[in-house]
Image (cartoon, rainbow, N blue to C red):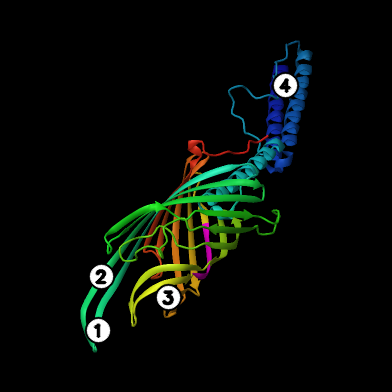
Amino acid sequence: MNKQWMNRSLLALSIQVVFGSVYAADGVESSSESSTYKSAEDTAVQVSGNAADNATNEISQANSSSGKAAPQVVTSSQPESGAETTPSLVPQEGKQAAQALQQKEGDATQETNLQEVFTSSERQYSLIKKGEISTYYDLDYSYYNDVQINAAVDQGALYQLRVDEDANHTLTNTFTVQYGLLDNLTLTASVPFIAKSDSQKDTTTAGLGDVGLGVRWEPFPLKAGRLPLILFGNFSSKTGDSPYEINPVTDLSTGKGYYSVGVGASTRKYIDPVVLFASVSGNYGFKESGLNQLRGGGDKGQRVLSEFDPGMTMGFSLGFAYSFNYDVSMTMSYQQTMNMDTEFRYRDDGEYYKAPDQTSSMFSIALGVRVSPETIVNGTLGIGLTSNSPDVTLGLSFPLDILGLSKKKRAN
């Protein structure tokens, strides 16, 4: 009887030692730092195993003296298959490296996407690689409304007062080709086709516009901490119908009527998630002589225009582009130009007229939508801010790569 009581006491004492060791191990585990979590867990398992072994030995010794078989105490450091386990909170080195690489790759993709959507609508701020060819189609519409007051004065008396409203509609289709002569030198050529309508003259016209050539050059390679600089130049012909060689009362022109050259510079700055851009430019128009256009009457009868000097045009542009996501982007910009030193000379009496300086400004909003991985379509809305600007302009631009009219350099 005494031996049986002693065996039960020893068994209870052993079980108490085992659970005490487990609770002690859990306390050490919860109070330790995450970097030593695994070590504390192994220690707890080892203590539990030692305590269980000691208890088993004591029970075996006690039962051996009484001649009875010792009960089996099973210990295991592995959890059961159905038991819930607490995942380790210690960050693994492999996962940290994968997350870092994934973040860097995402940042590069976002910057590349922002650059693509920006250059698709503002092509003068970018270049293409050597040997590449890209083609674009631009469809532009402009509306200009003007009110003219016609009156006659005879001996201080005003009569035949008439107010005419003149509405001009212009539709321009432009095909543009770009070729990468060098990695930092891009050549461009554009061919416009223009259709016009004038409500006051009650006439329409359509034909070829002024063909233009251009070049963009980046003199300095890209360098961290330095803004990119692109210099550009352009030449505009007079292939369209000249406004100084038609009947100004009944006909419409499709060109500006003179040759011109221009130069400028542009820069940009990427600040995630937007890109800021700005440019300045200047154009010089060559004088046209040998004209013979009837320009209404004067004090000495009808006047005939013989020479026209378009003068200089200076301008600047600034704005920003924002990418909402991979498929949609928006560009907002402001453009302003100032025309100076425009002169008209008339035949016979040598009458001379110098036009006052004129300023034109526009505010534009463009929305870009990616319709395929390599094709972005841009729609533009422009609002005229001065009397010399069109009241409203609309534009649609997209690359002609979908028709196979392009050549891109394949990656090695």
Residue topped by disc 2: 164
Q: Is residue 200 above or below residue 211?
A: below
Give the residue drawn at x 59%, y 59%. Answer: 233
Q: Residues within 10 Å of mark 4 (few under 14, many from 20)?
A: few
Q: Earlier in the sequence, mark 2 or mark 3?
A: 2
Q: Nearer the viewer, mark 2 or mark 3?
A: 3
Q: Where is residue 369 in the image (x, y as percent from the top left)?
A: 46, 46
**Residue range highlighted in magenta:** 310-320
Residue at figure coordinates x 55%, y 54% from the top left: 213
Sequence-wise first label, 1 or 3 = 1
The label shown at residue 153 is: 1
Mark 2 residue type: Asp
Q: Name the residue under label 4.
A: 6
Q: Quadrant of residue 27?
A: top right
What residue is disc 3 on? 347
**Is residue 214 rendered magenta in the image?**
no
